[in-house]
Amino acid sequence: MQRDPERVRQDVLNGIISPTKARNDYGVVLTEEGVDWDATTELLSEG
């Protein structure tokens, strides 16, 4: 969960990982517009 959220987003866009894996494994919450920074920060603070 220490990976840069923008890099995780790029991996999702490139089909390397799924949005579910981004959330579950990296704590990055994505929307159609990009990284949901508030939700990502909240999720990472819980972990």
Image: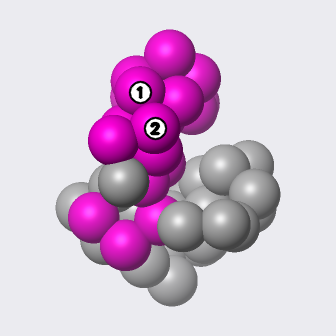
Categorize mark 2 by other alpha carbons within 10 Å: few (<14), some (14-19), many (20+): few
* Separation of residues labelled 1 and 2 (CA atoms): 5 Å
Helix, strand, or loop for circle 1?
A: helix
Residue 41: give x, y in percent of width and height: 53, 30
Residue 32 belongs to magenta span = yes
| Residue appearing at x 33%, y 41% in the figure | 46
Residue 38 belongs to magenta span = yes
Residue at the spot of label 2: 45
Residue 42: mark: 1
Examine the rendering and report whether any part of residue 10 can be seen.
Answer: no
| Residue appearing at x 50%, y 16% in the figure | 38
- Tell me which amino acid carries mark 2: Ser
Residue 24 to residue 23: above or below: below
Q: Which region shows up in magenta?
A: 24-46
Residue 15: give x, y in percent of width and height: 47, 76
Residue 27 to residue 1: above or below: above
Q: Nearer the viewer, residue 18 or 14?
A: 18
* Residue that protrudes farthest toward the front in the picture: 46
Residue 7: mark: none
